[in-house]
Amino acid sequence: MDRRTFLATLGAATAACAATGTARPLTAGLSPSTPDPARIARLARGVNLSHWMWYPHAQGERARRAFITRADLDGLRAAGFTHVRLPFEPSWLWDDAARSLRPAEFAEYHDAVRLCLASDLGVVVDAHWSRTPWIRPRGADFDERFGELDRMWASLAARLTDSDPDRVFLELVNEPHDLRDPEHWHDAQRRIAASIREAAPRHTIVATGADWGGVDGLLRLEPLDDPNVVYSFHFYGPHNFTHQAAEWGFPPWKDMHGVPWPAERAELERIADTFPQESRNALRWSARTGTEDPWNADALRNNLRRAADWSRRHERPVYCGEFGVYAKAAPRAGRLAWHRAVADALAEHRIGWSLWDYVGGFRIATGGPDARTLDEALLASLGLAHNAPPPALPPR
């Protein structure tokens, strides 16, 4: 996942919403020039279909077409989800040599979008780059850095313009990072958004800040001139809890296990003593910097409040496009408590969300295609209940 390298760069320093009975809509307090409230309501509760069209070469077309089925999507809708985020690898969809969409791959992705819509789920079309060679954040000029992404989106938005703008959202790129200057991304985002808007005048764009799309990146972002934009951020704090046992990114994670949440400093210190030195030092660091890593619900809520404050200050809607806990070694009780705390905080601030992820390492379901079982306890921690009626959308 893209945040792997991001979190590695932090070293030892990194070491739901709406439909749960809240009286005020997600758009409460926002400017009337922002997107239609019914559209924002579609972003109330979602999940990332992470490995369907992302890392697509690892599966092959036949496996991809069977990976997510109508039964999966109907089950998510029945559980109360209102949308899915549908990542794709840009270099899979776009032929940079020919400067055109690959016909077969676009048809496959378009079919996936329509399948989601058929289950009455909104879709965030997410350019989720990881191996795309022509996105070079450290390049010297726009064409080298993001020019090909701009051309891809101009073509893709034009091909999606006949999709329902009330249910299909266009997200420019996932977690921009490794920038010599964050302004490089701000300039690029303005240009790419303008290209999308020219091709798809009615669709809502999903924009994001630099710094891997985190809250800090959002806070440094000035809104686009376009009013029909939602601003995304991702949340995984504390990373030494949410990414324990991960074998990618920050090396100390792989030897962390059984790290609780919430937790007091003394408890974390004791657990850290059982780890190899690199992991011990990383966990000790995060245990001693509670203002940076939220190890209790109050600190977590205060951290997320910063995104809500940005939304109120600029009168623009925000959206938590990713949050979750890697399931391999996280204590079950802590994983449930963390999800509940994040979902409660996002609901308090009227922020819609999309969980990472459906059946990957941060999963909410187990089993194979057409035979998946949703984690009922985890659904409950998110304020969802299987076979619950879907949330009502506000009148248009």
Image (cartoon, helix red, strand yellow):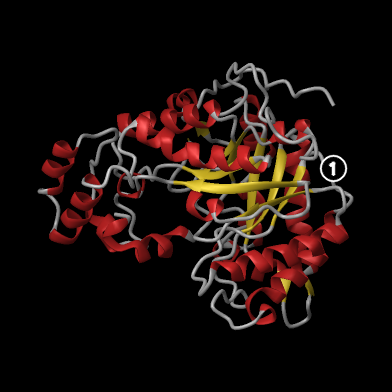
* Residue shown at the point (37%, 42%) measured from the top left: 327
Q: Position of residue 151 (x, y in %)?
A: 77, 72
For badge 1, the amino acid type reads Asp
360 to the left or right of 115: left
| Residue 80 image-quadrant placement | top right
Q: Position of residue 376 (x, y in %)?
A: 47, 25
Q: How many marks?
A: 1
Front-lying residue, 194 or 236: 194
Front-lying residue, 130 or 40: 40
| Residue 371 image-quadrant placement | top right
* Residue shown at the point (59%, 34%) measured from the top left: 351
Q: Position of residue 369 (x, y in %)?
A: 58, 42
* Residue shown at the point (54%, 51%) measured from the top left: 219
114 to the left or right of 335: right
Q: For mark 1, what is the residue?
A: 164
Label 1 sits on a secondary structure element that is: loop
Residue 356 in view here: no
* Residue shown at the point (34%, 40%) measured from the top left: 294
Query: Considering the image in quadrants, where does the C terminus appear?
Result: top right
Is 11 rendered above or below residue 270? below
Q: Position of residue 150 (x, y in %)?
A: 74, 70
Residue 117 in view here: yes
373 to the left or right of 43: left
Front-lying residue, 226 or 132: 226
| Residue 33 image-quadrant placement | top right
